[in-house]
Amino acid sequence: MKVTIPILNNEYKAVFCCGDESEVKKVLKDCYHVTDDISNDFFDNHRGLCFYDSSCHPVIAMPKFPETPDEIATLAHEASHAVNDIFRKIGETHSDEIYSHSVGAIVRKVLEKKPK
Ligand SMILES: [Zn+2]
């Protein structure tokens, strides 16, 4: 699964993906600007990760769709890294409120996509 969340406008976006390592690898490859890769046993040791790129499209990866309180906490954690990355790159340092709304938007948009 892959969810794209615009942040502030359509130029900046966070990407959320979940699935096993091979699915995440596919999304990272799609996002050609992400140069990091993921090892085949990555999710044995990580609950989630945020990958960064040279533009403003950080990619949040998780092993499964977040449902439990712990998994949703991990999503919020990675969402804050993603928004930090975008804000750092555009030089936004003034608004706590916009930052918090952006983190909220990622968590909301992802959870809205809960598979039925
Ligand atoms: Zn972290």
Image (cartoon, grey):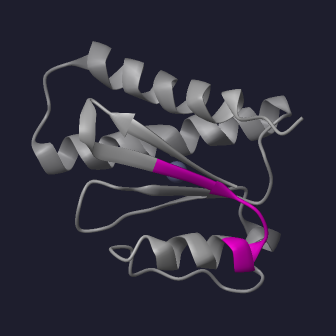
Seen in the picture, residue 64 relative to 102 is either above or below; the reply is below
Seen in the picture, residue 44 relative to 16 is either above or below; the reply is below
The image quadrant where one finds the C terminus is top right
Is residue 2 in view from this perspective?
yes
Residue 61 sits in quarter: bottom right
- At which x and y percent is residue 6? 37, 37
The image quadrant where one finds the N terminus is bottom right
Q: Residue at x 26, y 54 (%)?
A: 56
- 16 within the magenta span: yes
- 99 within the magenta span: no
- At which x and y percent is residue 32? 38, 77
Q: Nearer the viewer, residue 36 or 70?
A: 36
Q: Nearer the viewer, residue 29 or 69?
A: 29
Residue extent of the magenta highlight: 15-23
Q: Residue furthest right?
A: 116
Q: Nearer the viewer, residue 84 or 12?
A: 12
Q: Residue at x 45, y 29 (%)?
A: 103
Is 104 placed left or right of 1 in the picture?
left
Q: Residue furthest left?
A: 91
Residue 84 sits in quarter: top left
Q: Residue at x 27, y 39 (%)?
A: 10
Is 68 placed left or right of 49 in the picture?
right
Is 39 placed left or right of 63 in the picture?
left
- At which x and y percent is residue 100? 39, 20
Q: Residue furthest bottom?
A: 40
